[in-house]
Image (cartoon, grey):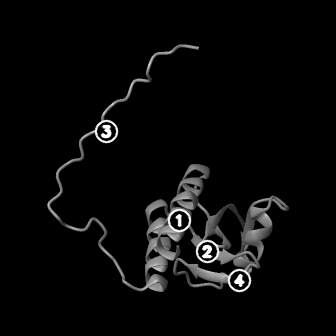
Amino acid sequence: MSSEKPVRLPPLPRPPRDGRERRKNRSNSAADAIVLALSAAAKRSRLDAVVLCDDEGLLVASSPVDYDLAPLAAIAPIVGRGKVSAHVRRGDERRPMRVEPVEVGQELLYVATVGADDRARAREARWSAAAARRILG
């Protein structure tokens, strides 16, 4: 083992900000804020839907869609635990699904993303899980 001190680099300078809020839609209500966050994730990556559910599969919040997401919320914890494959059917089409567990306080929640490509689903599931921790935690 070397007794040399590790190299510590100073943090990169942050670009100057003019005090404007980067988010266009913002809410002081946690319920509205989580819906805005999930909607932004779905829109950003052209996902079919983003769902946040509890450990029992009850829908907590979702991106707005014109169909019922309760069945998706019901299977998300099962998929999140690795018990079944991660896809759903919408009509005749098989849509890929990604589920990310997220701890918020003492609660275990799950974020499910449906549609788009693997990287987009994974990225938005992680981003949505972080948003859920920040907003609901």
Q: Position of residue 125 (x, y in %)?
A: 58, 61
Tag 4: residue type?
Leu
* Mark 2 to mark 1 CA distance (whole Å): 9 Å
- Circle 3 SS class: loop
Residue 92 seen in the current view: no
Tag 2: residue type?
Leu
Q: Nearer the viewer, mark 4 or mark 3?
A: 3
Say which mark, if any, is on residue 52. 2
Q: How many numbered marks appear?
A: 4
* Mark 4 to mark 3 CA distance (whole Å): 42 Å
- Circle 4 SS class: loop
Q: From what the image shows, is residue 97 above or below residue 11?
A: below
Contact flag, marks 3 and 2 (Cβ < 8 Å): no
Say which mark, if any, is on residue 58. 4
Among the 4 quarters of the image, the one containing residue 12: top left
Q: Where is residue 112 in the image (x, y as percent from the top left)?
A: 64, 67
Ranked by sequence position, the earlier of labels 3 and 2 is 3
Say which mark, if any, is on residue 128. 1
Tag 3: residue type?
Pro
Residue at the front extreme of this rendering? 3
Among the 4 quarters of the image, the one containing residue 67: bottom right
- Badge 3 is on which residue? 11
Quadrant position of the N terminus in the picture: top right
Q: Where is residue 89 in the image (x, y as percent from the top left)?
A: 74, 70
**Residue visible at 53% across and 13% down in the picture:** 2
